[in-house]
């Protein structure tokens, strides 16, 4: 059966590699050479670094490791090792120029298609079983989302194009009760799951309420207009210190005009869309809003339970809507649109309990630190996740409008510093269920 056998994997890998490359090329070709080598923000690499880094990782894992082939450009490994140079220092490096970088990634890709054709894709080491290809597809898509964030930080007229998101719709009650008890968290069977999503294990929660939608611009504006950024009651100590030091007054890219909020997105400034999820807030802002609203952020366990647990069967699913791969009807993914969609825009993507837009639209901050699950094993390299475990990073879940469907699922874990807001991050709230509400 071509679909489930080795040939099916080969086809799937080839399609996904091509999709990822099409997206990288579109993001790169949207700007001129000067904009490719420039630093648009100290937080980001020059776009031309991302491109050659994508090629270099592909060369390391697929050409050299899986394929056992001769290096293409061993001399540039050090330049494109993310741990060797901070993003802010990358523009000063002797990087491949735009034309050279394009040639390099093309040459690597040609060899990868050759490796893919001759690779057994089964048996032997796990790396040979298609996983390495899946890891590299996801790596390219992750950098494409990073490049999209660089585009958002770039100043100038719009260069990217996409259709507006679909219209919103009804979402039912504002929050739903998730029953307490155990469920299966993480996965041991999802073929392309990264090391930090593994292994599948039992986790348990008390009963809790979770919002059926991410917090919207309109709701968040009420917090801002209520003086939320000037009131230490709502902020943690670390959050308050940060909001003062960084002089935060509203989400990143919000612009005040008279008594109105506008928002700049990809070179276009327009009135804030009240029913779209808020985006470009840091963890501390999310935490403060939740406290102001009389709620809190969900833990990572609570988020995943809301996104996977089917109370009818007791089973954990791959996505809120079931096990089928995401389509355009389920979620706002794949950079199909250049913004989050209004709440209620994806009724087909809701969970059995009626929780909407868990996948896509905005990454959702959780209250959890990034740590390995019990039984975690580094695979295939410690620098993917393990070196980030600890109290410095907070977990985000669910993907954004800029995340590709190959690079997100309900077990997927993203992480960042609690002060970061250039990523496409928003949040939803949760709260404990009181005894009266459970009676
Ligand atoms: C999972 C998004 C935090 O971009 O730092 C890219 C993904 N790892 N190259 C990042 C990643 C190596 C990673 N995040
Ligand atoms: Fe990378």
Image: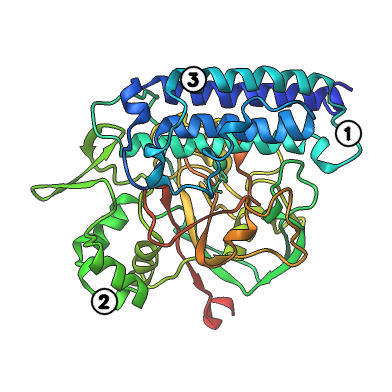
Mark 2, residue position: 232
Q: Quadrant of residue 66?
A: top right
The percent coordinates of residue 287 (x first, y second) are: 39, 67
Query: Where the N terminus falls, by quadrant?
Result: top right
**Residue 166 shows in the view:** no
**Residue 85 shows in the view:** yes
Q: Residue at x 74, y 67 (%)?
A: 374
Vertical relation: 133 (above or below) 399: above
The percent coordinates of residue 181 (x first, y second) are: 70, 71
Vertical relation: 217 (above or below) 329: below
Mark 3, residue position: 100
The quarter of the image that holds ligand 2 is: top right
In the current view of this chain or complex, which residue is farthest to the front?
Answer: 75
Residue closest to the eye, 344 or 133: 133
Is the C-beta separation of discs 1 and 2 under 8 Å? no
Left or right: where 301 falls relative to 274: right
Mark 1, residue position: 122
Q: Residue at x 79, y 52 (%)?
A: 188
The percent coordinates of residue 275 (x first, y second) are: 34, 46
2 or 3: tag closer to the N-terminus:
3
Vertical relation: 202 (above or below) 4: below
Q: Quadrant of residue 178?
A: bottom right
């Amino acid at each position: 059966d071509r679909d489930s056998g080795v040939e099916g994997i080969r086809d799937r890998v080839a399609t996904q590699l091509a999709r990822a490359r099409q997206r990288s090329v579109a993001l790169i070709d949207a700007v001129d050479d000067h904009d490719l080598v420039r630093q648009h923000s100290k937080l980001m690499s020059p776009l031309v670094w991302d491109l050659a880094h994508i090629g270099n990782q592909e060369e390391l894992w697929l050409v050299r490791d899986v394929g056992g082939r001769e290096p293409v450009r061993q001399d540039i490994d050090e330049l494109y090792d993310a741990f060797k140079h901070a993003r802010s220092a990358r523009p000063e490096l002797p990087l491949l120029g735009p034309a050279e970088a394009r040639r390099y990634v093309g040459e690597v890709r040609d060899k990868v298609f050759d490796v893919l054709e001759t690779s057994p894709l089964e048996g032997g080491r796990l790396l040979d079983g298609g996983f390495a290809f899946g890891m590299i597809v996801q790596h390219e898509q992750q950098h494409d989302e990073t490049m999209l964030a660089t585009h958002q930080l770039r100043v100038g007229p719009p260069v990217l194009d996409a259709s507006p998101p679909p219209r919103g719709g009804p979402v039912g009650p504002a929050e739903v009760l998730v029953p307490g008890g155990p469920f299966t968290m993480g996965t041991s069977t999802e073929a392309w799951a990264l090391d930090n999503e593994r292994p599948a294990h039992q986790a348990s929660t008390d009963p809790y309420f979770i919002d059926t939608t991410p917090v919207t611009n309109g709701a968040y504006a009420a917090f801002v207009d209520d003086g939320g950024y000037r009131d230490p009651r709502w902020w943690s100590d670390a959050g308050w210190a940060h909001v003062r030091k960084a002089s935060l007054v509203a989400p990143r890219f919000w612009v005040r005009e008279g008594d109105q909020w506008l928002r700049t997105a990809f070179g276009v400034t327009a009135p804030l869309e009240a029913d779209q999820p808020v985006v470009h807030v840091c963890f501390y802002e999310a935490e403060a809003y939740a406290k102001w609203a009389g709620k809190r952020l969900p833990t990572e366990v609570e988020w995943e339970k809301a996104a996977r647990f089917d109370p009818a069967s007791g089973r954990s699913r791959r996505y809120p809507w079931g096990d089928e791969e995401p389509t355009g009807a389920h979620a706002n993914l794949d950079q199909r649109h250049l913004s989050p969609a209004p709440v209620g825009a994806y009724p087909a993507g809701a969970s059995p309990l009626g929780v909407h837009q868990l996948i896509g639209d905005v990454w959702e901050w959780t209250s959890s630190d990034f740590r390995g699950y019990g039984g975690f094993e580094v695979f295939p390299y410690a620098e993917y996740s393990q070196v980030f475990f600890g109290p410095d990073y907070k977990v985000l879940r669910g993907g954004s409008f800029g995340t590709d469907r190959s690079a997100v699922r309900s077990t997927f874990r993203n992480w960042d510093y609690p002060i970061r807001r250039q990523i496409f991050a928003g949040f939803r709230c949760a709260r404990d269920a009181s005894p009266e509400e459970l009676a």
